[in-house]
């Protein structure tokens, strides 16, 4: 039993000694000087190093090889700078490995990026952290700690997200809707924040304003006001060529003195007109009249002059708010030299009247190749009935007029015939062979 207890104590003592050895300062090298942003710092300083959230800070570390170092160099040494207390892991940077020789002096530079979302406000003051500088190899290490504070920038707005509808790929002629979410991560209230979306290559631009955004850690209880959304839209011209374009989102604030910029790559599928040498697409009428509640048919005619088979379909846009539309058949396949037809049936609602434009998008193998703009001249239901009654009366009058004209012609012929016949009966008979005395 005693032997077992002694064994446990021996293992515990060995572990404790190993732990102390790992934490002990290296007998072969040490940290002689540290500079942060070109300012020397000391572990005994009562003042703090103060940096801002999002800042990229430069740290310079000087290491010296001690006289007690062995004649051979110490290999596989690194320098590491790190800050703990960040919610998503340590903020750290380290050098590549190098070797340290006896009495040698080494200078290493590290760049530490302070996260944009690290806690940086403590009741209006900067948040306190510890900057750790460590030199280590596989056996020894040397570490010093320095006081560090991280504060908010005075003016610091962020584009948290940009949502595009229908997405990052649109068709020429469509509208691109963008919702831009802006958040205030700075120390000051920002008013009249301008949010702008543009596609410079197409000369398109849209803008709107956010009235006010308060700081993230404000005494104001309305936390929702730290961020807000802006909805914008851009009408993509039908003449836009197929290709990739830059969508630029700008946020301008602090009376125009501050500006942030975000860029997104989007694709526009341009409307490609089919060459007349390859195909002919036509419609039997641009504008047609139809009674409310009735129906009218537009015929789309296709002729494939190319050498390959083509599949055409049609999409009707702009009818849904005042009626309905049906495409029959859903698609038509044409071989080289063949012709075909699609029928667009438009049915206006019962309460619709007036001229209504709409568009038929012709697709070939899924791609829009032509847009046809059509009109439906809808006659109101009461007007349609009156028009029908008058049409019947007019047609009856026309038929009556034709019959009357025929009767007059017949009557004229009879009168003329009778006159000719009466003239022959009144003429006296003469006997040329008889003489009277």
Image (cartoon, rainbow, N blue to C red):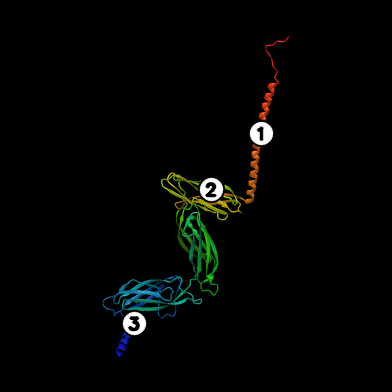
* 164 lies above or below 437: below
What's the CA distance linking mark 3 and mark 1?
A: 130 Å
**Badge number at residue 407:** 1
> Which residue is located at x 53 percent, y 48 percent?
298
List the single residue furthest toward the right.
Answer: 437
Q: Which residue is mark 3?
A: 19
- The answer to whether the residues at label 3 and label 2 have Cβ atoms under 8 Å apart is no
Task: Where is residue 173? Give x, y as percent.
Answer: 50, 54
Q: Secondary structure at mark 3?
A: helix
Q: Residue at x 47, y 76 (%)?
A: 127
- Kindly identify which numbered label has been placed on residue 303: none
Q: Is residue 408 magenta?
A: yes
Query: Looking at the image, which residue is at 63% across and 46% down?
Result: 388
* Nearest-to-viewer mark from 3 and 2: 2
Is 196 situated above or below 34? above
Magenta includes 305?
no
Which region is colored magenta? 406-411
Tags 2 and 1 in contact by the CB under 8 Å rule?
Answer: no
- Callout in the foreground (2, 1): 1
- Cβ atoms under marks 3 and 1 closer than 8 Å: no
Tag 2 secondary structure: strand
Q: Residue furthest bottom?
A: 2
Most common secondary structure along the magenta stretch: helix
**Spot occupied by residue 46 in the image (x, y as percentages of width and height):** 44, 80
Q: Earlier in the sequence, mark 3 or mark 2?
A: 3
């Amino acid at each position: 039993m005693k032997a077992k207890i002694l064994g446990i104590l021996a293992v515990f003592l060995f572990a404790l000694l190993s732990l102390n050895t790992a934490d002990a300062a290296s007998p072969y090298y040490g940290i002689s000087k540290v500079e942060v942003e070109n300012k020397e710092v000391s572990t005994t300083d009562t003042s703090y190093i103060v940096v801002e959230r999002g800042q990229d800070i430069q740290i310079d570390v000087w290491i010296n090889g001690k006289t007690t170092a062995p004649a051979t160099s110490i290999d596989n040494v690194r320098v590491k700078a790190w800050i703990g207390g960040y919610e998503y892991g340590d903020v750290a940077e380290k050098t590549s490995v190098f070797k340290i020789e006896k009495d040698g002096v080494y200078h290493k530079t590290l760049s530490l990026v302070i996260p944009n979302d690290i806690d940086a406000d403590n009741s209006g003051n900067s948040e306190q952290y510890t900057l750790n500088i460590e030199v280590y190899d596989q056996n020894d290490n040397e570490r010093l700690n320095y006081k560090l504070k991280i504060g908010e920038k005075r003016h610091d707005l962020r584009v948290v997200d940009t949502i595009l509808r229908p997405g990052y790929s649109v068709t020429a002629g469509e509208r691109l809707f963008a919702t831009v979410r802006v958040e205030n991560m700075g120390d000051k209230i920002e008013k009249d924040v301008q949010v702008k979306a543009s596609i410079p290559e197409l000369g398109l631009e849209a803008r709107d304003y956010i009235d006010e955004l308060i700081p993230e850690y404000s005494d104001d209880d309305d936390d929702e006001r730290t961020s807000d959304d802006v909805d914008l839209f851009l009408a993509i011209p039908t003449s836009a060529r197929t290709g990739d374009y830059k969508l630029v989102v700008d946020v301008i604030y602090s009376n125009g003195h501050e500006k942030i910029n975000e860029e997104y790559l989007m694709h526009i599928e341009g409307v490609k007109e089919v060459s007349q040498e390859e195909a002919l697409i036509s419609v039997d009428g641009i504008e047609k009249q139809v009674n409310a509640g009735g129906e009218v048919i537009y015929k789309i005619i296709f002729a494939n002059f190319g050498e390959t088979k083509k599949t055409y379909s049609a999409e009707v846009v702009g009818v849904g708010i005042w009626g309905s539309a049906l495409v029959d058949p859903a698609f038509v396949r044409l071989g080289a030299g063949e012709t075909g037809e699609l029928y667009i049936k438009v049915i206006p609602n019962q309460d619709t009247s007036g001229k209504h434009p709409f568009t038929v998008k012709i697709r070939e193998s899924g791609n829009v190749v032509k847009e046809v703009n059509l009109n439906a001249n809808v006659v109101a239901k009461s007007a349609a009935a009156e028009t029908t009654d008058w049409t019947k009366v007019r047609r009856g009058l026309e038929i009556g007029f034709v019959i009357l004209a025929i009767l007059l012609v017949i009557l004229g012929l009879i009168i003329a015939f009778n006159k000719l016949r009466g003239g022959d009966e009144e003429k006296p008979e003469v006997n040329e062979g008889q003489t009277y005395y």
